[in-house]
Image (cartoon, helix red, strand yellow):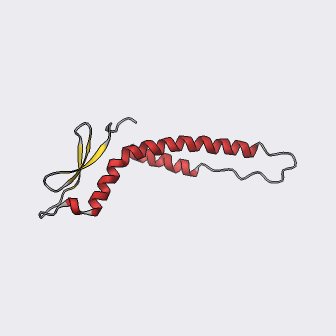
Amino acid sequence: MTGFTKGEWHVMENCAGSIEVETDHDNYLNIGICTDGEDCTNNPEVLANAHLIAAAPEMYVMIESLTKELYRAIDECNDQRLSHITSQTETPPDLWDMESLHLAQLLLKKARGE
């Protein structure tokens, strides 16, 4: 995975009451910067967004891995179904399409900024 910050990402609360996502390489992203003395650490939406962003690198790797595994499984399943076609077969077998894989690949492409 190129172009992404390596290492695990963590949700951190800073002393000013804002929420940050930090990496092992001292990179960080402010997720919630609250005004008027509001404490972002008590804002469920800010916390949920921070945890989602912190999980993004692992989710990217998992989606990429699942896409490869699913492609192989669908391909094998379709090959198996096609092998049962004979001259007496009246209708072709239902084959699995690759639409979900295509959508997953588009999502990974979006995450890469392409």
Residue 98 is situated, as x and y percent measured from the top left of the image, at 59, 48
- Determine the residue located farthest toward the right in the rendered image: 88
Q: What residue appears at the point 69 percent right and 45 percent down from the top-left corner? A: 78
Q: Position of residue 28 (x, y in %)?
A: 23, 44
Indicate the position of residue 87 as horizontal and vertical percent values.
Answer: 87, 46
Quarter holding the C terminus is top left
Q: Is residue 2 left or right of residue 91?
A: left
Quadrant for the N terminus in the image:
top left
Q: Residue at x 50, y 48 (%)?
A: 104
The answer to whether 99 is drawn above or below residue 7 in the figure is below
Residue 113 picture quarter: top left
- Asked whether, in this view, residue 44 is left or right of residue 106, the answer is left
Residue nearest the viewer, comparing 3 with 44: 44
Nearer the observer, 19 or 33: 19
The residue lying at 57 percent from left, 44 percent from top is 70
**Residue drawn where x is 77% and y is 51% of the image:** 92
Tell me how many marks there are. Answer: 0
